[in-house]
Amino acid sequence: MAKLHVSTTINGEPVEFLCEPNDTMLDALRGPVGLTGSKEGCSSGDCGACSITLDDRLVCSCLMLAVEAEGRQVGTIEGMAKGGKLHPLQQTFLELAALQCGICTSGMLVASEALLKKNPEPSEEEVRFWLAGNLCRCTGYDKIVRAVLEAAAEIREQGIRES
Amino acid sequence: MNIVTNNKWIGQRTIRPDGADKVTGRAAFAADTAMPGMIWGKVKRSPHPHARIKSIDTSKAEALPGVMAVVTARDIVNFPVDKSVMLGIQDMRWMCRNVMAREKVLFPGHPVAAVAATSEAIAARACELIEVDYEVLPWSIEIDDALKPDAPILHEFITFEGKPSNIAGRIEVKKGDVAQGFKDAEVIVERSFTTRPVHQGYIEPHACLISVAPDNKTTIWSSSQGQFMVRAMTAHLTGIPQSDIRAIPAEIGGGFGGKTIVYLEPLATLLAKKSGRPVKMVMTREEVMRATGPTSGSKSTVRIGARKDGTIVAAQGTFYLQAGALPGSPIRGAVGCSFSPYDIPNVLSVGYDVLSNRSKVAAYRAPGAPIGAYAVECVMDELAEALKMDPLELRLKNAAKQGTKAAHGPVFPRIGYVETLEAAKAHPHYTAPLGKLQGRGVASGFWFNAGGESSAQVNVTEDGNVVVTTGHPDIGGSRAAIANICAELLGIDYRRVSVLIGDTATIGFSNLTGGSRVLFASAMVVTQSTEKIITTLRERAARIWEIDPEAVKWDNGAAHPASPNAGEFEPLTLAELAAKAPAMGGPIGAGVQLNTEGAEGGFGTHICDVEVDVELGIVRVLRYTAVQDVGRAIHPGYVEGQMQGGVAQGIGWALNEEYIYNRDGKVDNPGFLDYRMPVCSDLPMLDTVMVEVPNPKHPQGVKGVGEVPLVPVMAAVANAVHNALGQRFYSLPMSPPRVLAALDAKE
């Protein structure tokens, strides 16, 4: 059977790729699209290492078919730093040592950015429940939660400065 | 010792050298690369817990269009069972049978063949077409079943007390006269415990990409805890000499001990050799759960005797640990570490390595020690209760210190165990009020720590910056700490130091990332290399100034006259001396290779608060404080991170994680939904107290910090649950169904 053709937008850029009907979006990203920042930890939607946004909604790309990207806006970790400058979440993760091995980090950052877009001032509890779908085995989450809270404060302050 | 005060970079929370790559998705992990002409490998696995392989027919698989190669045990170098061939702590007899079943399949998921094909789907289809004729055999999973007199024997050639047995080994640690010791005791507590096997739980499944040229030159790209381990094991199992194999360490997405052995690399190498194409293999999560790791389940009995004043006079432990289907459970950690925090005159600690039809265990963070500490530290809690003593006071009264002869042999040098107890006692957490159905527990733990072989090369670039190459995969931020040390010694900004992990062709042999050795060992070789460079820099400045090298000091990134007597010269910076290098004898760089010694053991003491939901059976950790003697925190952020990560894994082990087997002898929960590791909303902030008692045998005072923090956790949680409910649990995990059952039984 011939492959399917998909036209989509990834991190603001128009992208076309070919895929099998049963390929996941994660397969497409890591394969034909060549963006390997999204990781495959389980392929069952349990670990969150493949987190992306689809029209600003946080999804596990391993649970989404690649063909569903047709005509949609996809956001991945590769689009987070703009113009060679790290996003405040990325910078804070580095400053607070919120990663050890780094395999969950792409998904954590994408999920955290999606949270802060919905809720710019989350409580610790809100961060913990939002990130409950992103497994990290290295950090015990302590520094991740602190980094998200600190980045949220930093982003709010930037907003005040810019307005 | 070379411990500099007023450090500029040692002790700073610098940005890790690999940081930007890791937060932008650039970092290349094992599954993130491709090669031209690459094809895909898949493993055909046993559906049975125990069966004799009568025949394997691969003809239908080989005939499937797109299939490029098939391998079975016949293609793998055989290591006969009667002759041990050790590689580090691994016996190649068992390794060769673990990567591919030979005479028998020994657990569900045991590889029986591997296929390479032009797509993953074709490789998977080809695996289904391989026909294996099995003679299904009786099996056992649990320790008690494996030790029954009529239990099915996994390996007829393994004997214990003269008979074929599932006990593959016994070790013993002995000090004094334990029988006499118990006679002298006024209070004795003896209890038995069980723990379940738990998986290391790294989020990155095992993966590799391997190319073999027609002349056998082999390139391995894989994530592991040791590229040299990968090279050596692959060489042993394929017959390709080590000099022909270049093993490149990908970024590793978690290991915790589980990536200290190979699973896929020898298979992919043979498939690549047979097919002439690069072969990529990536495990599914289900394969990881069924066929890799975990650590042992256990059964143990611990007895401790004390005088009424709290002086412990005798201790005895018996530990049965599951090895899985091939020998090699971490009994040494359970037997050797359990009683080491205490100065006890009479100790007898015995461990048994028990075979059964489960996947072969792999190392997991302080292998064996958490299992032993769980039993010992719970008994210590009951002993304190019986003696009406505060549990930290009981530990303080009996704490090992400088000069104590540990039960496992060594005499401790200056150690910081007492300091951890005192810091825990003084911590506000220890006296904070508790509410209804809330409880507090404490526990301590010890881990040996390791040194071993390490290599480093430090080069000054032409523009006066520095590149450090070491040989241990960085699993949790070690590159950041190495940058701090090198920058400190050279007196330059840490951002001028790049730290890389070399492959097996570009850096000298370095032992695998394990035993909490990495920073201890790397810091030694990097320090010596950097000191050699500083000597060269001083000599060159002396030649320019035409003075004696002894009259030149290196300070703050530049050569200076050591004193006014040496003359008056403008300082020569690293960049200036680097620029003059071609005219002064050439490139500036130095490498050092050592078998490092002096990695002293580490101690920790933890405080845990829990609340028990008696309606749902859920134990929630409310507050946790981990205190640890860390030697010297070179990068405090990543030391705290090790402590927090160990605690989180221990909480999972204590409260939820376990392999659940069905009636067919297969794991029923081989995924992250049902094998429930702690998620973010399960945990509170994890407080850390770093006690710094520098290791006297290390230039910066470094001690291993990665493994100790898992050791005390399960006992701290269990003691807290007892404190909350007035009821003790002697089995892990204390999961909701078990807690509810125990509460019902009490009523």
Image: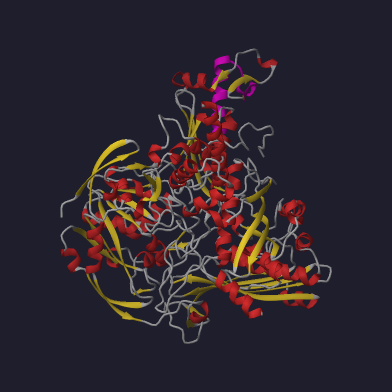
In this view, the residue in front, B536 or A99, is A99
On the picture, is B436 further left or further right than A3?
Answer: right
Work out which quarter of the rendered image holds the N terminus of chain A and state it. bottom left
Residue B114 part of the magenta segment: no
The colour style of the image is secondary structure
- Is B244 placed above or below B195 here? above
Residue at left 54%, top 34%? A156
In this view of the protein, can residue A97 be seen by the observer? no
Q: Nearer the viewer, residue B594 or B407?
A: B407
Left or right: A12, with B298 as reference point: left
Viewer-nearest residue: B56 or B236: B56
User: In the figure, is residue B278 to the left or right of B489?
Assistant: left
Identify the residue at the far right of this view: B309
Residue B600 in the image: x percent, y percent? 64, 52
Which portion, as a residue range, is magenta?
B529-554
Q: Residue at x 33, y 74 (%)?
A: B103
Classify A67 as above or below B731: above
Q: Residue at x 37, y 65 (%)?
A: B96
A65 and B626: which one is in front? A65
| Residue A75 place in picture, x, y as percent | 37, 41
Q: Quadrant of residue B133?
A: bottom left
Q: Is residue B532 magenta?
A: yes
User: Residue A121: horizontal and vertical position, in percent?
Assistant: 55, 41
Residue B585 position within the rendered picture, expressed as x and y whole percent measured from the top left: 46, 23
